[in-house]
Amino acid sequence: MAYRVSTMAGMLAAVLAGALADCLLQAFFAPSPVLTVLLMLFALSMLGVYLFFNASQKPRIGGTAGLHALIDTSLKEAAGGRSLFAGALRRFVSRKQSREMADMMNQLHNSRIFLKNIINHVADPIFVKDRQHRLVEGNSAFWRLMGKAEADVLGKTDYSFFPKDEADVFWEKDEEVFTTAKENINIEK
């Protein structure tokens, strides 16, 4: 086992510095400085931040809200109700989770653009409706067929564009697709 302070940039360094500062504060006010240090190391290890690790292992960071509550409670009890360290860990993991959520949203956005590019290159009109029969997606061939801009059509039902008797037929066909989960191919003659 080799001792190594993690070299992960930015926030990990801030958390480690905050943890050490909190440990020093608690050492002056807690009944047992040794207990405070052990709790700090335990909390770090529970979150996956290892100060002692094998050279072949990489440090990782993680955690859950339930774990934060457990750590926060343990540290507050050990420090007579004061726990700056647990708050720093909570803020750090919250920022990490925010970054992960932003990454996932970015991936979702990129996937949506990719899908949109694929369906836009299909020559036949394609459209998608939600369960309330509102148009939620379509390709460029569909927008040309409708003779309207995408923004003017999205979120609306067939009743916004067609006479009631024609929209009733479309609604019935859409309902059949929803209930049977089978495609409906409409070939105009």
Image: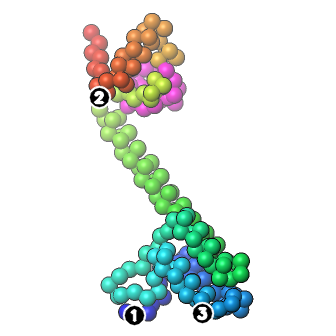
Q: Residues within 10 Å of mark 3 (few under 14, many from 20)?
A: few
Displayed quadrant of residue 119: top left
> Which amino acid, mark 1?
Ala
Q: Is residue 89 visible?
A: no
Q: Is residue 156 visible?
A: yes
Displayed quadrant of residue 83: bottom right
The residue wearing badge 2 is: 123
Q: How far separated are the C-alphas under marks 3 and 2?
A: 72 Å
Displayed quadrant of residue 179: top left
> Which amino acid, mark 3?
Val
Q: Earlier in the sequence, mark 3 or mark 2?
A: 3
The residue wearing badge 1 is: 2
Q: How far separated are the C-alphas under marks 1 and 2?
A: 62 Å
Query: Height in image: 110 above or below 155?
Result: below
Q: Earlier in the sequence, mark 3 or mark 1?
A: 1
The residue wearing badge 3 is: 34
156 within the magenta span = yes
Residue 132 position in % (x across, y down):
48, 25
